[in-house]
Image (spheres, helix red, strand yellow):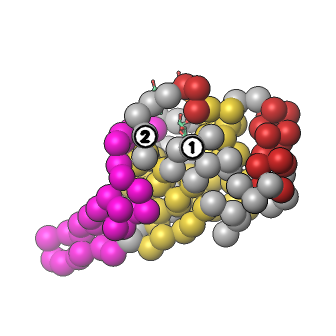
Amino acid sequence: MITNTQSIKLDSIGGEYGSLIAVEESQTVPFEIKRIYFIYDVAPNVRRGFHSHVNLWQALICVHGSVKVEISNPFEKEEVLLDAPSKALIIGPMVWREMFDFQPGSVLLVLASEHFDESDYIRNHELYLKMARSWYEDGM
Ligand code: T46
């Protein structure tokens, strides 16, 4: 995985009554969870994201359907397919992300390490590349 990202397999407890997945802060995911949100009703041709965070850690879990996530920095790029509720993608600071190819009906659940703060976003790609180059080259 590219720097500051991680792919995690969540344990699913299954049986004849269905399946259950539990996520615990600082255990299943490597941060305290201060906020959750979910993204849904996204048309198949829509691409979202187009930003990085300065400090935020998040876990992305597609609890229904599937979605692709492109994660990149000035030196690395990767595409991750979230197509099962047992797959979690951890994304840390200074990683550019774009979510696309939402299958109709998909629900993308996100667990976040901080409350919402627009000042933590870098939404301009040129500015991101400039900041990220020095951030990665200076050893974060
Ligand atoms: C991320 C990806 C995976 C809020 O008011 N509170 C919130 O907690 C969030 C997440 C968003 N908003 C507002 C900010 C915008 O006015 O909702 C609007 C849509 O947010 P945005 O365009 O940033 O949505 P995405 O799908 O591009 O990005 C979201 C998260 O914002 C971002 O942190 O990493 O999902």
Q: Seen from this angle, which residue lies furthest bottom?
A: 15
Are the residues flagged by discs 2 and 1 in contact, CB closer than 8 Å? yes
Please tell me in which quadrant of the rendered image residue 85 appears. bottom left
Residue 41 rendering spot, x and y as whole percentages: 46, 34
Q: Is residue 105 left or right of residue 90?
A: left
Between discs 2 and 1, the one toward the N terminus: 1
Q: Which quadrant would the C terminus be assigned to in this image?
A: bottom right
Q: Seen from this angle, which residue lies furthest top?
A: 118
Q: Nearer the viewer, residue 67 or 112?
A: 112
Query: Magenta part of the protein: which range?
Result: 11-39
Residue at screen point 52% across, 36% down: 42
Location of residue 97 with respect to 127 vertically, above or below: below
Label 2 amino acid? Glu
Q: Is mark 2 within 8 Å of ligand 1?
A: no
Q: Nearer the viewer, residue 23 or 137?
A: 137
Please tell me in which quadrant of the rendered image residue 53 appears. top right
Residue 28 rendering spot, x and y as whole percentages: 36, 67
Kind of element beneath mark 1: loop
Location of residue 45 with respect to 75 vertically, above or below: above
Residue at screen point 41% across, 56% down: 31
Q: Is residue 121 left or right of residue 132?
A: left
Which residue is under mark 2?
Answer: 114
Label 1 amino acid? Asn
Which residue is under mark 1?
Answer: 55
Can you tell which mark lies on residue 43? none
Q: CA distance from mark 2 to mark 1?
A: 9 Å
Q: Seen from this angle, which residue lies furthest front?
A: 138
Residue 94 rendering spot, x and y as whole percentages: 68, 47
Q: Is mark 1 within 8 Å of ligand 1?
A: no
Crowding near the residue tagged with mark 2, few <14, some 14–19, many ≥20 C-alpha atoms within 10 Å: some
Kind of element beneath mark 2: loop
